[in-house]
Amino acid sequence: MKIRLFILLLVLLLPLSAAAQIIKVGGSTTVKAFMDSAAEAYQKLHPDVQIDVQGGGSGVGIAGVVDRSVHIGMVSRELSVSEKAGMSGVKQIAVGIDAVAVAVSDQLFYGHHIHSLSKESIAAIYSGEIDNWAAVGGPDRHILVLEKAMHTGTRQVFAHGILGQSKAPVLPQAVVVGPNKHMRTLLAASDQAIGFLPFGELDAHVHGVEIIVDGKAYAPTVDEVLSGAYPLSRVLYLLVSDDAPDYVRAFLDFLTSPNVVRILKQAGYLPLQ
Amino acid sequence: MQWNASEQSRHAVGNSGWIVAVAFLLLASLLSWFSLHAIRTNMLNVVQSELRSVNHWVDSSLATQGEEMFGETISLVSEFSIQHALITEIRGLGDADTHFKFRRDMAAWMVSHQFRDFFVFNASGRVVAGMREADVGASMPEPLLPHLATILAGNHKLTHPFATPDGFDTWVMVPVADASGEVVGIFALVLAEERHFTAIVVKSRSGLSNETYLVNRQGTLLTRSRFEDGLHSAGLLKPEQNSVLTVRVADPGLKLVDAVRGSGNTDDWPLTHAVADLLKHPDGVDMQGYRNYRGVQVFGVWQWDKILNLGVITEIEIDDALSEYYNIRNLLIALLSGLMLLGLLLNSTYSRYRHKLEREATYHKDLLLESTAEAIYGIDPQGCCTFANKSCVRLLGFDSAEQLMGKNMHALIHHSHVDGSAYDEQSSHIMRAFRNKTRVYKRDEVFWRRDGSAFPVEYWSHPIFDEQGETIGCVVTFLDISELRDAERQRSRIEKQVQHAQRLESLGILAGGIAHDFNNILSAILGNAALAQRKVINDPIDAKQKLEKIVQSCDRAAVLCRQMLAYSGKGKFIVRALNLSASVEEITHLLEVSLEKGVVLKYALEEELPAVEADEAQIQQLIMNLVTNANEAIGKKSGVISISTGAMQADSNYLLDCYGDNPVPGRYAYVEVNDTGCGMDAATRDKIFDPFFTTKFTGRGLGMSAVLGIVRGHKGALKLYSEPKRGSSFKFMLPVSSSVVMDQMMEPKAQDKWRGHGLVMVVDDEQAVREAAIMMLEDIGFITISAENGLQALELYRQRGPEIVGVLMDLTMPKMGGEECFRELRRINPDIKVVLTSGYNEQDAIQHFAGKRLAAFIQKPVSPDRLRGVMHKVMGDDT
């Protein structure tokens, strides 16, 4: 009787103990776009592991790893010196690159050959100094400026690269959209809009333009990004403490393996190699 | 070697085992079938209700989403600034700047409400504002024109997807009214993908094949198929083409897999059962299964949404819906097959095990049957052979048991009696074992060999019973007793020879003794007679004494004569009650004369000894032999032979080491002869009773075998104890007679002074005997006449019959014997008193003449006292 009870308990507890392998991931929503798919893929391979992915931004990722409220922190920007100082026993692992393109619609790209814009022109458009496409060689048409919320990673990359500081103010007359998808929808629907999107979000009707810096044009291509010359890009990092359990390390190994390249690309990011 | 009956019963058991197994399997299959049927029915009900609920969910989700969009849109256009801007544009009062501002105001709202474009139409269906300046002035898309009037009439509309150069679009359109409430234009929004019908039906998908899709009245798909990849690979869709508005929900007639496309033009295919039914009825269900647009057998549930004017169809592949049922069914089939296999395995294992046991049993049975010297065969109730062992086959002269199997054994080996007369099977003792259910033993019949010769057998027929106690066969065990019979004949012949020789030998010994004794008696008679003769005148008293001594001597001589008679062969085997002590006394004083000088005889005889039934002559010979043997054992040395008699109770234990023919426990009288002679060793003891075995130089080796023969003949027992140089002890015991103790040899104490009178006729062929009798009768007081034989006696009796009071007659006479004469005399006078005399045994004579009114019988020799006593008894006191 006792043995039976024991076996029953064992049977009941086994899934519980397996379910106890929960990996908590938190931080940058940029990285989360990739992490969600990666976690799903990993859970298919390891049904006993449960991965909880939360957003909140890079700052949340850094703080989470430091206070051990998450196993893995997601960060989509370079760490500040003070942040680095506060993270003893935490490893920083690069998983991909988020590159941002300045994008226009079919009508402007093909119809009016807006293939390249200088960094200065873009900055002028986004600061309101230029409000007509004619000023940059396009048709005589108002420029519909599409913006994103200041705190988002993509906007920070854009603002850092174009406006000189990542927390540059948003133009009042700009249309501020939420997800990249909305930005893309509007870019596709409009014949006078300008916006910025991660490389992966570009499609057949929304085109990235070359950015001219110091007279030299940088095309929004993977090669340019990997060469390091393209101005609007950032490295995506994962933070993990040295004392993380084995099943977390196993997941990290998966995230840095070639298996995830496809997932990374689907999320709009570029692999490191 | 087989037991057919048991073989059959085993077969029966095996068969019933199979029947039980098959019945069990049938029952299990039947139960499984019923259960499966119930499960299937239940599962179909569950599937149907699931399909129905999914279908309703999709339909209500469509309605909800429609209402949401209308609500959002109407509230947008009701907003003052937007309404104002709209009316401004519709009235054509706007310019590029107002367009741009309106566009900018709309952009964020639009994308955040999951629309991707917008248009403003005036009442004539022309674009007055939109996302792109270039669109201004364009006309409403062709497929939407029919809705123009409806919307201008104040209704709002959610369109079906319609084809555009980039694919398809779905619009929501609401009327725009001015301050007076008059509809002046139309505000249209293009749905983003999230708000397409497909987005809702995708959410309803579950399992492997559950799919809900929407169709219009033409049977064209309004949502993307869940299995677009399959449609692509089947060639139904071009690459890059999706299924909305391109796939006609028609039955391809076969399952579309990979590159297999249905035959003919897709427009010729009939609409699927679901669509065909939808065009006729508002809703429907098919749980029998039909082929859907992919050619796959499905269950389906459908309904027509009147507001959206489209059909909502929910389907699931039959194989998917019933997969659980198929799993259970396969599991059950596997279980049943497993059970069957297990059963077969168990059965074969069990039958192998049983065969092994049978083989072992047969081996042991064979070992027993074949190793025994006795012949054994079995028969069934019809008398036919069921098995036979080697001994049986050999004794009957056959080569193998197969030649006997199934044959009627009675007809084969037991058909005739020993004299050749036919032996009816039903009356045979073997069949009697069947009828009476008892064991039968016979040893006086013959069996016939194969070659037609007969041999005497001893057989046992033992019936075999089944569980109900019915006879199912007999086991017959037999032995060839030819040799035994020969040995018996041989033994009886030898025994006769031995007895004959023994008699001769003992006669010789006896004759010596008797001659010696007789000489002594004669010497005494002669001496006394001579003295009496001389003194009869001078001294008559002394002479009388001498004469009395002569009479005594004659008595002794008479005893000797009786001995002689016993051995002469006339004694034959005359059994009568006998006192062993008397027998010992009688014989040993005869033997004393022949004992060696140094041998002393001692007696310890029990006087009150119970009588035994025995032949006196043989017993005397027996004692004589034992004493002679003891004497010879002592030989020339000095020694003691002690003879004791007595009575004892012998139990079976005591009788166990006795010689004899299975003596029964009981009361015995015994004679024990001990000597202090040379004794015997074990080897001699073993052979001492063998005929012709002797340790003596001159002996004939018959003495002791005769001793045992006589003991056996009297159903007695003989105990032998002997040690070399210590002496031997022989003790023979005879069962005590049931009749009272009597002493034949006791002389009647005749102090009888009775005197008779009258005429007595004495009949005897021997003159001396006749005269002695006459003298004695006259001495008693009778007057006598005499006759020499029966004829003379009859003559005399006829003449003087009335005078004669009695007749004393010898039994054995020439011309006419005593017996015949007695008969004739009785014919003349039935009351005649005849006393017969004979040397024969008195008991015998009395028995012989019982009921013939013989007055008395006196055994010779006759003494005066005995004669007086008998005559007194016969005549009575009145004479």
Image: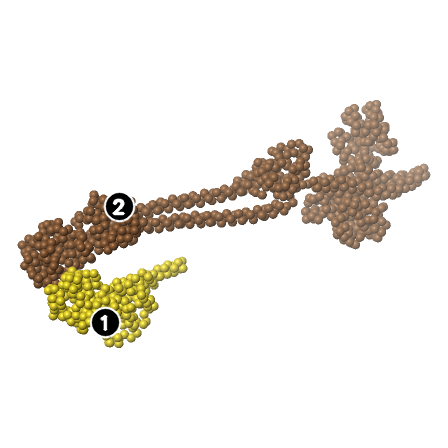
- Relative to A267, residue B735 above or below: above
Residue A229 is labelled as 1
- Residue A138 percent across, percent down from the top left: 13, 65
Element type where label 1 sits in the image = loop
- Relative to B601, residue B468 above or below: above
Q: Is residue B380 visible?
A: yes
Q: Which class describes the residues within 10 Å of circle 1: few (<14), some (14-19), or many (20+)?
A: few
Q: Is the residue under label 2 in contact with that under label 1 (CB below 8 Å)?
A: no
**Which residue position is annotated with label 2?**
B264
Q: Mark 1 is on which residue type?
A: Ala
Q: Quadrant of the C terminus of chain B?
A: top right
Q: Nearer the viewer, residue B289 or A256?
A: A256
- Residue A15 percent across, percent down from the top left: 34, 61
Q: Which class describes the residues within 10 Å of circle 2: few (<14), some (14-19), or many (20+)?
A: few
Q: Is residue B51 visible?
A: no
- Residue B119 percent across, percent down from the top left: 12, 57
Q: Nearer the viewer, residue A137 or A70?
A: A137
- Residue B592 percent across, percent down from the top left: 84, 46
User: Hue of chain B?
Assistant: brown
User: Hue of chain A?
Assistant: yellow
How far apart, in angstroms, are the residues tagged by discs 1 and 2? 58 Å
